[in-house]
Image (tube, rainbow, N blue to C red):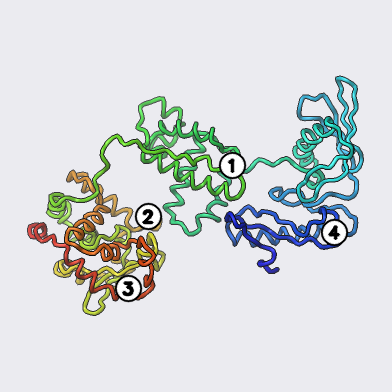
Amino acid sequence: MPYGTYLIRSRHASQWYARIIIPHDVREHFRQRREIRKTLNTSCKKTAKRRVLLVWLAYQDVFDALRKGQPVTTVFPTDWGALADLTTAIQPLKVSTPRDFGAKLTISHIEPLKAHRVSSGETLVVELVTINPVTGEITVKDATDGDIKLMKELAPHIWSQQGRQEGLATSVLPQTQPDALPLSEMWDGFVEESMTQAKQKSQQSIRQALSVLIEIVGDLPANKLDKQVVRLFIKELASYPAQRTKGKRKSLTLNEIRAGDHKVISPRTQINIINNLHNFAGWLVEIGKLDSNPFTQRKKQQVKQPPRRKTWTEDELALWFSSDLYLKHKNSTSERWKYWLPLLGIYSGARLEELAALAPKDISEHGGIHFFEIHARDNRSVKNASSWRYVPLHSHLIKLGFLDYVISRKGEERLFSLVPYNGEYGKSASKAFGYIRQKLGIEPTFHGYRHTVAEALRIKNTQTEHISWLLGHSGKTMTDHYGSDADKRYRLPLLSKAVERLDWSHIFTITT
């Protein structure tokens, strides 16, 4: 089946639609429409290709049945509604009204729909003429206001609730919109359509946020997630306990934890949870489960204190690199990464994960310049396209014996003996460095080396473009993107000059 004909995309959104051409000989059943477009409730083309085939095949069965004057027996997924009406009568179904009307209903496709009110003895008769095969709209001949009210308010509801229990075809009468799946059951679809290229860490972050939402407001049907629910959630989130899934708190209920003394999550964590749920709710809007994103009004962090300092001071650098907690790992057999990673960070500005995941073969030489390559091969990941780069090795690193260390790791999968956690090599390193910083009373993190390197190069009048190349930042203008696919090794001479401007000799003379 040519998808170019039967699979189309909305001009104003990312949703995919099935496009079904109605044959001339059955168009009278569709008010002479030429084609039908049905949303496939997905922005993922792979998923849309699977669904469009089902839609196309179902409509062919409908067309064939209409030509032969036979009932349409295809029971199609309710997400796409009734496809066409039955053209022959079914046996009447007697059911009780779900509302307090004191009536018995007889539902039939061709025979009249009768309602008898016990209280008044009145019998109402509604002649059901047809059901629109596209919209499911009921057309009633010579309808009174009472007929319309009875049909629209009672019949669809009864049919959707009672008819399904009797195993009847869902296309006989239009159904009320069924409740969406619970939030917890929407997760797999969200991952399949929106998170296939996302890091596992990002998936886990949104999954945890969804778990918090469900714990606070319950596992609601997806279409019940409105602004009123979100306002309640944000209010309750302010008192949500920190470390909820660890220790004794894991086995306690939320009320039991709140009854005692507990530390609540930080404002920053609250914002992250809400922003993650904003992404999830945005997908619910895309697939038609919500009309609008109830998390649009995001919570803003109140500024109660100066932002945390990220750049290292020279005193902090001297304290770190002269500390026994750091230097004792210089000749370690299993944890030399604790010695080399901080040095690589302060002499390159590279991210911790980029350095922790290096392999011995990533260190090479071109035109007399030794460098290491940062890439996303062999199951590694980088932040963006600009993160793929070549970073020159500072002469001080070579003097300290880094190339000898690289040779000693030849044949190993990774340059450093780090065990990955959820696919990330820098996780355990970050935890170890955090312990040392806490012992030394140093505020900035390993990531602060990037800020320190950028500031040091700015002070040395290094071109902003060269700093961006070194740190792996994307350009801000269109011109910055031209030539970005060229061989980046030709940038090494310029970047080597920039790296050599990082002069920490007044610190390392007493430390290494």
Local packing at callout 3 (Cα closer than 10 Å; few below 14, some 14-19, many 20+) is: some
Q: Is 41 placed above or below 371 here?
A: above
- Amino acid carrying label 4: it is Val
Mark 4 Cα-neighbour bin, 10 Å: few <14, some 14–19, many ≥20: some
Residue 26 position within the rendered picture, expressed as x and y whole percent measured from the top left = 85, 59
Looking at numbered disc 3 in the image, what kind of residue is underneath it? Lys
Instruction: Confirm or deny contact between disc 1 and disc 4 (CB under 8 A).
Output: no
Q: Quadrant of residue 149?
A: top right
* Mark 1 touches mark 3? (CB < 8 Å): no
Q: Nearer the viewer, mark 3 or mark 2?
A: 3
* Residue 161 versus residue 354 in the image, above or below: above
Q: Secondary structure at mark 2?
A: loop
How many marks do you count on the picture?
Answer: 4
Identify which residue is drawn at 25% across, 53% down.
Answer: 446
Q: Which residue is mark 2?
A: 421
Q: Give the mark, 3 or 4, whose residue is nearer the N terminus.
A: 4
> 477 or 114: which is nearer to us?
477
Alpha carbon distance from label 3 to label 2: 31 Å
Give residue 480's mark: none
- Residue 241 locus on image (x, y percent): 39, 34
> In the displayed image of the protein, which residue is found farthest to the bottom?
367
Badge 2 crowding class, 10 Å Cα cut-off, few under 14, some 14 to 19, many 20 or more, is few
